[in-house]
Structures are given as structure tokens and as C-alpha cells.
Image (cartoon, rainbow, N blue to C red):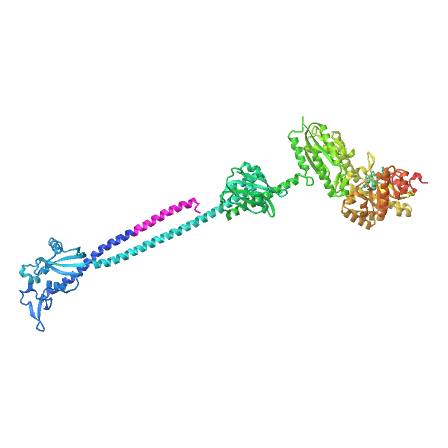
Amino acid sequence: MTNDPSLRVSTKRRRILGFAAAMLWTLALGGTLAWNLWQQGGVLLDEGRNQARAALETQAAMRYFVTHVGGIYVPVAKGVEPNPFLAHLSYRDIPGPNSGTLTLVNSSYLIRLVDEMTPGRDRVRVRAVAIDPLSEKNAPDTWEREALRRIRSGASEWGEMVVEEGKRWWRELRPRIASAECLDCHRGQGVKTGEILGGLSVRVPLDPLQAIMARQRMGVWLGYGLIWFLGLGGGIWGYVLTGRWARQRVAMEGKLKRELDNERTLGDILEISLAEMPFESRLHRILEVTTRSSLADLEPRGAVFLADPETESLHMAAQVGLAPVLLDACAQISFGHCLCGRAASTRELVFAGCVDERHETRYPNMTAHGHYCMPIHSGERLLGVFTLYIAEGHVRDQQEQLFLTSVADILGNLIERHLARQSLEHQAFYDELTGLPNRSLFLDRLRHHLGGGRGQGEVLSAVMFLDLDRFKTINDALGHDHGDRLLSEAARRIAGCVRPQDTVARLGGDEFTVLLEEVANPATVTHIAERIHRALEESFNLDGRRVTTSTSIGIAFTDTLELSPDGLLRDADTAMYQAKAEGTGRTVIFDVGMHSAAQQVLTLEQDLRAAVVEGQIEAWYQPIVDLTDGTIHGFEVLARWRHPERGIISLGEFIPAAEEAGIVRDIDRHMLEQACAALVDWRSRFATDTMDSLHLAVNLSCKHFAQGDFMDCLLSTTKAAGVRPEQIRLEITESLLLRDPESAGQVLNRLRGMGFKVALDDFGTGYSSLAYLHRLPAQVLKIDRSFVAGFLNDTAQSALVASIIRIAHGFQMEVVAEGIETEAQAQALAAMGCQLGQGFYYSHPVPREEVDELLQACKLPLCTTG
Ligand code: C2E
Ligand code: CA
Ligand code: CA
């Protein structure tokens, strides 16, 4: 408290004031006492004078009486002799009672007798003195003579204090004027009336009075002393009390001031934490404000660290006043190391009053200091630590700890918001799976690159568009987890093929892009593309399963006409499509001609949409026959587009486009309706026994299959047409079923429950394992035509086809071979136990009008029927 300078000043002033007040009090009281004592000195004389006067009055009265009555007679006794100076009076002595004598006593004689007969010397004594005494006893002493002289010189009376025989007396003398009565005794002396005969002299002892006075004075002294003492004591008590109050007030003021400062500083810090400025600047400003605050005995030095839970370390994010050597030494601190690391690992405040053994980071010429290391956290999560330097020997106190906790809270909030923002930004600009930039960031970088004027003129840059071949099949077959792992690994491989300054991004799905900035020439880019091909063609190990893939790459250079980021990307995409069209693992460099091709695809999509609406899509039928005798078992319904200009187009090549355009569902439904109508028509016109066993196989897109109302749609369509579900087979590709076997199984079971039969289309092209077959409640398996095309000349493939047929039979499935083009194929398949088949050998898909002919023939191929 005494550290407060204002308090020190006021204490000094108070001391001076207190001292002055005590002096004044003492002086005032001393003065009053002195005046009082001086007054008492006068009182002594007054008292002496009063007593003298009283005695004189008494004497005068007595004398007046005695004189007036002409004297009094008293018996002559011892000490009372007849007055010789009255011997001239005949009536001086008269006979008294008991034969004694009475003698006349005049006033002077009476006074003398009274005086002589009254015992004690130190008492008030009155006697008569005469200028011309008759008796020697009445002769004046020296003082009386002087007094008489003064009276004769005009004074009416004379009195003063004298010291005689070591004692103090008040002496007074009053003149005795001769009256007619006096002449009786003094006639002989020739006295005249009115003449001064002498005086009445009185002596009052002052010492007894003095003793009384001394006692009184003692009382006064004591009284004053007491008052002085009480006054001074009260003053000191008041001084001490007010001093304490002042200290308490100052302490309270100090506390309030600190609290106010606290609030103000925290307000400032909060404001900074919300200000529009970079995160690091905000941390720095907060440090500055905190270290400058008057709350703690802080030095203008400190740092804020951010925690990285993965590496269990702190990273310096902001600092003020740190020694340069520390910027390196403390750039990264492991949890548990030094003071800050301890605060991080214990998540508790670490306080050090000096550089103690916990302070592990030291450097030459380090000045003595202490630390506050405060963990910053949000709930359980440690976000960082901030450290502040304090003067050595500083004693921590509750209030500053509270302040620092509040600062840590604000910092925690700020860091949390920053992290959330970073993560949002990351989410907005980076692909979560691969960690690569996403489309937005890629386009942004491309825009930036092009905007900076680079990649133009002399400098050449390129955009690569990559799409993994057959990824969808792999993904469907092996599941999304494996698909994701393949994508991550592919991303890593692609990134490994380019320079660090190039940008590799994932646009989504299996599409990647690469921005190659400032390349030497086109050959460099194709060289990089080759490298990427080689890298991706190496097999991927997904949980022990070896999977191979390849990629199609389209390249667009910045020296084309197109210089908008979107345009460049679209060009590279177009080139990639071209590469895909040419096969797998190809690279195509964009050229302007591709624009029109891409344009055509777009037009096609629009035309297809119109075709569906205008009814240009027709159902064609390809018979499915018994391989042993060629009897027709059913028909596969295949979509054909009767194009106004281009004639009949197989829809097979447009199915992906139709799926993209979202119209495949309408096509499938349309095919089903037409098929049902056809079946009803044939039933009415052909023999019932053939018709009852005839089935129609309808293809269903996987997009369609995934839709919720799919089954309702099937049921309502067949019901409306009056067709039994048993007559309809639904062809579904195996990849669709393998993607989610659980729910696919449920759907298939329901379809089966409704009476539909399910056929696994294109079996063998996907990644399905034969082992999966039992989990798929399909009743028909269709061997893909690629197997049929090659198996006759390939013993391995032939063995594969044979085992597919065997296993399918093992699961009580019907087997249909697709794409039979020759009799040999048909016979070989029949020999392997495959009952049914379809293909050009028997019949191409035909329009509905031509089906009648086939049905009438009953047996196929037509040419062999006889
Ligand atoms: P898919 O289901 O495997 O259909 C059989 C395809 O093989 C048909 O091609 C057919 O014309 C062709 N084909 C039949 N016999 C032979 C043969 O001996 N040799 C050769 N090389 N090919 C033969 P298409 O009509 O071009 O259909 C192609 C694919 O398009 C179909 O393959 C099917 O997946 C899909 N598709 C066709 N129509 C529809 C439809 O209405 N809806 C759906 N979702 N997909 C359809
Ligand atoms: Ca089919
Ligand atoms: Ca097929």
C-alpha cells in the first residue's frame, strides 16, 4: 500500500498537520494556563487586601463603639492594668463588684489589649499606631512610618505585600483622624479635631493563603494537564484513526481502480479479439495490451502459442519483446518441456517467481525474471498457452490471476473462432478425402495465374483433366471404403508426378485436375501425363486385394483462344472425354475441333429428351432361345431411337448420356409399358401354351433401381396392362447389386415376393466374385457377351465360363449366354449345360412388327428351322 505515491504525499502532509495541531493545542492550553496562574497571583494579594479590610472594618466598628460610648470599663486583672495615659481622668478607676476595681479602657487600649491577649503570631493582627504615641507600644515600625508618611503626603490609605521574617504579608494602614471623642485622651498632646493621629495597621499573613492558592494552582495545573493530555490523546487517536481510514480508503480506491482497469483492459482485449484484422495481428495486439496493463507487475514481454495435439507441441503464433534467440528456441515447444510446455501438459497455470529449475530454455545474459504461463482451452480441448514475463520476486495475487484467466478465455474464444474459420475455409477450398484443393480453389488459382498475365504469350501453362477409368465399377464392386482409399492413393500418386508449385485438385468423384504453371513446351506436359499414366497403372493394394486402374487425361494449353478459367477447364474436360472415347489410359490434347464434338454431345442430350417426349424411342425385341432346340423362351426388350435424320439408333451408347440427363427412368418405364402391351397383344393372337411360358426381359438402369417408387411403378404398370409379374424379368447389372448387397438383397427379395424374376446382367464384367452369388437373390444369370466372344479359343476363359455355369446351377439359377454369334458357340455353351442364349446367331433385335414372324416360326435360328 505504501507504494502508492499519492498516499505517501498525503501521509507526510498529515504528519505535518498533526504536529502543527499538537503544537497549537499545547500553546493554546499553555497560554491559558499561564494567564490563569498569573490571574491567581493577583488573587492572592486581593485576598490579603480583603482580609485586611475586613479586620480593619471590624476594628473600626469596635473603636467607633468604644469611642462613642466614651470607653468601656473592664475589671483590672492580669494583663489589664489601668491605662497610665488616662491617669488624668478622675473616673479612670471605679469600684467594681466583689471589692475589685473597674478601669476605663479607651479604643486604642482596647485594640492593643485584644491584640495582646489573642494567641498566635501568624494571624491577622490589627494595632493602632500613633504619630505621636502616648505609649511606646503604639509607636510605628519602619513600614508603618513610611505608610504614615505617604498618608500625610495625601494617600487616603496605604497597603502592599511585604516579606518579613521570611514570610509574606499583606500590610495596610488606614489613617486615624482625631474626632471630638479622641480629645478626652489626647487633650494633653494638643490634638485638634480632624488631625491625623496615626493609623490602624493591619497585617495579614499571606503564606496560609499562598498554601491554599498553591493547592488551587496544583488543581489548575492538573486540570490543564488532564485537558492537554486528553486533547492530545484524542488528537493522536483521531490521527491514527483517520490515518487508518485514509489507508483503507486508498486501498479501496486502489482496488476499485484496479478493477476498473481490469474491466477496461479486458474490454479493449475483447474488442481487439473481434476486430477486423488478421488473426496473428490480433494475438499480437492482445499481448501488447495485456503486458501494458497495470494489473500485474508485468514486463512488456510475452508470447502466445497454439497447441498442435497431433505432435503434442506448441507453436509460437505471436510475441512481444522476446529476445531474438528465443524466436528460434521457442518456435516450437513440446508438451511438458519448460514452463509453457508444463502449462500445456498439466492444463494448469504455471507460475514462476524467478528462473527456477522448471525454466529449461536459457541463454547467455538472460535477465532475471519470472513467468505466468497460462493454458488456453475450450472445455477439455487445449488450444494453446500464453506466457507473460514478470519481475523477479513478484508475488502472485488472486486479482491478477483472475485477470489472466479472463484474458485466456478471450484468447480461447478467438483461437476457437479462428480454427473454426480455418476449418470452414479448408472445407470450402479443400477436398476432405484427399486433402487436395477442390474445384473452387483450383479455379481460383487458375484465375489468379491467368490474371497475373502468366501462362500467356511467351510462357506456356497447361491444365490437365484426369478421370480414372472404370472407377465406378471398382467402387461399386469393392465398396466405397475401398473406392475412397483408391482415390486417396491415386491423388498421392498424381501429386508425386508434378512439381511442388503445380496445383493438383480433385473436382469430385474420380476427376482430378492439374495446373502446370510455366512449362517449357507441350512435350513437357505430355511427358508429365505419361508419368501419371505409369504411376496410376501400377496396381493398388486395397486390403490385400490388388486392383488396377488407368486414367484418361485431357490437356488444354493456355495458348489456345480460350483464356477464362472455366473455359480452359472445360476444354481439358472435352479432351479427356475424347481420350475416354478412344479407350482407356489415353492422353488427348485439346484442339478447337473438339468443341464441335462436345457440342454434338450436348445437342444429342437435348434431342434425346425431345425424343422421349415425342415417342421416338421404341422397344425392339431380341429372342432368348433354348440352346438345345432353339425354341423361343422369351425376348429381351432393347430400346431403339427412331431418329428423324439418322434412322434407327441403338440406345446402348446413349444410356450413360440418358442417365446423366435423368431421362433413363422414363425410357425404362416406356419400354416396360410397350413390352406389357406387346405381350397382351401376342397373347390374343398366338397359342396360349406358348404364350404362357413366354417371358420378356426388361433392362433397368441402376439409377432407376435406386429410386423409392421403383417397385410401385413396376407393379402399377404390369397390373394396368394385365400382365403377370412372372412373365417379366428384370435385368440388372451385377455392379448395382454389389454396391450395397444388403439393401439390394431386400429389394430383390421383395421383387421376388411380387412374382418378378431378376436377372444378373453382364455377369463377369464387374469385380464381383462368384462367392457373392449366393448373397444375391437373383434367379437368372446372364454371361456377358465378351466371354462368349472369346471362350472358344481361350481354354482359361472357357474354364471360367464353365465354372460360372456350374456355380450358377449350384445356386439354382438359370443361365443365359449373351452375344452368341455362331453355331459353335451355341453348341459349346449347350454342352457346358447353359440352357438359354441370345445373339445374332439366332436373331438381331427386331421391331415389334417382326416379332410375329419369329413367334410363328417357334424355333430359331430361322434359317435352320425346317
Ligand atoms: P445388354 O443388356 O447387354 O443388351 C444386349 C446388347 O447386346 C444389345 O445391344 C444387343 O443389340 C447386343 N447383342 C445382342 N446379340 C449380340 C451379338 O450376337 N453380338 C453382339 N456384338 N451384340 C449383341 P444394345 O441394344 O446396343 O444395348 C446395349 C446396352 O444398352 C444393353 O446391354 C443394355 O445394358 C442397355 N440398354 C438397352 N436398352 C435398354 C433399356 O431400355 N433400358 C436400359 N436401362 N438399358 C438398356
Ligand atoms: Ca440386358
Ligand atoms: Ca448384357
Q: Quadrant of residue 311?
A: top right
Q: Is residue 773 magenta?
A: no
Q: Where does the C terminus fall, quadrant-wise?
A: top right
Residues 776 and 331: in front is 331
- In percent of the image, x 35 and y 48: which residue is there? 19
Magenta region, mostly helix, strand or loop? helix
Q: Is residue 268 left or right of residue 557?
A: left
Residues 652 and 553: in front is 553
Q: Position of residue 35 (x, y in %)?
A: 26, 52
Residues 263 and 634: in front is 263
Q: Is residue 5 magenta?
A: yes
Q: Quadrant of residue 70?
A: bottom left
Q: Is residue 35 left or right of residue 588?
A: left
Q: Residue furthest bottom?
A: 98
Image region (quadrant) for ligand 2: top right
Residues 319 and 685: in front is 319
Q: Residue furthest top?
A: 458
Q: Position of residue 543 (x, y in %)?
A: 74, 43
The residue segment tinted magenta is 1-29
